[in-house]
């Protein structure tokens, strides 16, 4: 039996047919080519994304497509792809962004050199369309920092929500993968990985570029704030013995997300949520679990919020 690839690239796909030829072409331009497989997990696309991917299979060795009949959301689909991945490392990316030509090997190298079990790169935003868009090479000596307190770094920091991740498969499994209770994984995945990680690398270089082709679920502001709240709230509820600075940071995230949700679809609670947010800033150490549980109930009742559907 032949050994599996060292790296499994897992990409959830929903209605990305226009972007996929450019995304696959960028993977095919990796130099040096990594020992990798490329698992595209379709989430019941309506635009022929599966047919496009099957037509591109000959252009990228290791490309495979997982088809689904129901739309369950990117969190569920990332977990589905990761469950079938054979690699020691998982590279988790969006399906409409152009990867830098040396990104995969650079992320893997930094993990090996630092002993980290997770690394996050940047996503460059541009107004350019994907045709012709290329992300510059990262180079041999990119700027990065290393943290031995990954959860504190991510919970207390900013800029770790875009899908430009590499993590060991063991870490992904230990963390339980993406939170299946939350439709969008952007906020919850970093927190869950970091809660089990030993060392984290913050790579301060663009791993991918996001152009104007395609779209992001996070442009739905109500969904974004709903999912941001529950990413922090679920971790608070699921975890015992979190450091005090992490608990305070997660509470701040909850109250901030709830206040923003009040202006994006959570009607009737604006004054109370603004007051709750102010108290959280003035008295960050105050245990306000009852208030957060009440807010969670309001958010669970929000209309027009997409929630995960078991595959």
Image: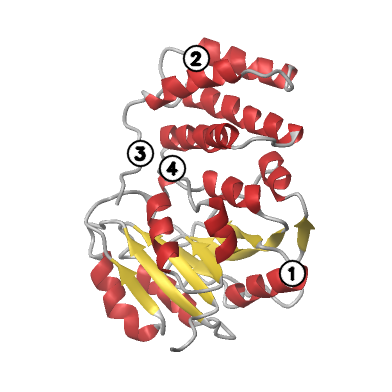
Q: Are marks 4 and 1 in contact (CB under 8 Å)?
A: no
Q: Nearer the viewer, mark 3 or mark 4?
A: 3
Neighbour tally class for label 1: few under 14, some 14-19, many 20 plus, Cα within 10 Å: few
Q: Residue at x 62, y 64 (%)?
A: 206
Residue 270 is marked as 2
* Of callouts 2 and 4, the N-terminal one: 4
Return the residue at label 3: 307
Colour scheme of the rendered structure: secondary structure
Depth check: give the residue in front, 195 or 68: 195
* Of callouts 1 and 2, the N-terminal one: 1
Neighbour tally class for label 3: few under 14, some 14-19, many 20 plus, Cα within 10 Å: some
Q: Are marks 1 and 2 in contact (CB under 8 Å)?
A: no
Return the residue at label 4: 219
* CA separation in Å, label 2 and label 3: 23 Å
Helix, strand or loop for disc 3? loop
* CA separation in Å, label 4 and label 1: 30 Å
* Of callouts 4 and 1, the N-terminal one: 1
- Image height check: is 55 above or below 228? below
* CA separation in Å, label 2 and label 4: 21 Å
- Image height check: is 298 above or below 127? above
Task: Kindly tell me whether residue 226 is visible in this rendering.
Answer: yes
* Of callouts 1 and 3, the N-terminal one: 1
């Amino acid at each position: 039996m032949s050994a599996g690839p060292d790296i499994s690239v897992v990409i959830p796909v929903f209605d990305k047919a226009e972007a996929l030829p450019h995304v696959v072409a960028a993977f095919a331009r990796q130099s040096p080519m990594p020992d990798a497989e490329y698992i595209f997990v379709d989430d019941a696309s309506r635009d022929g994304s599966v047919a496009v991917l099957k037509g591109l299979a000959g252009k990228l060795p290791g490309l495979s497509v997982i088809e689904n009949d129901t739309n369950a959301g990117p969190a569920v689909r990332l977990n589905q792809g990761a469950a079938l991945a054979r690699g020691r490392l998982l590279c988790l990316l969006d399906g409409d962004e152009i990867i830098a030509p040396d990104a995969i090997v650079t992320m893997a190298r930094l993990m090996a050199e630092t002993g980290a079990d997770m690394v996050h790169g940047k996503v460059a935003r541009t107004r350019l369309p994907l045709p012709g868009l290329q992300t510059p090479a990262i180079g041999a000596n990119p700027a990065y920092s290393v943290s031995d307190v990954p959860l504190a770094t991510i919970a207390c920091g900013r800029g770790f929500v875009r899908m430009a991740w590499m993590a060991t498969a063991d870490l992904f499994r230990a963390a339980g993968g993406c939170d299946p209770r939350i439709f969008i994984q952007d906020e919850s995945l970093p927190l869950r990985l970091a809660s089990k990680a030993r060392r984290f690398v913050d790579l301060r270089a663009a791993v991918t570029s996001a152009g104007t082709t395609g779209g992001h679920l996070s442009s739905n502001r109500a969904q974004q704030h709903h999912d941001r709240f529950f990413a922090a709230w679920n971790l608070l509820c699921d975890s015992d013995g979190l450091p005090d600075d992490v608990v305070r940071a997660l509470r701040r995230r909850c109250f901030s997300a709830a206040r923003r949700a009040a202006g994006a679809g959570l009607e009737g609670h604006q004054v109370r949520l603004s007051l709750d947010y102010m108290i959280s800033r003035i008295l960050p150490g105050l245990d306000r679990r009852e208030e957060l549980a009440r807010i969670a109930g309001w958010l669970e009742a929000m209309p027009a919020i997409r929630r995960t559907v078991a595959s």
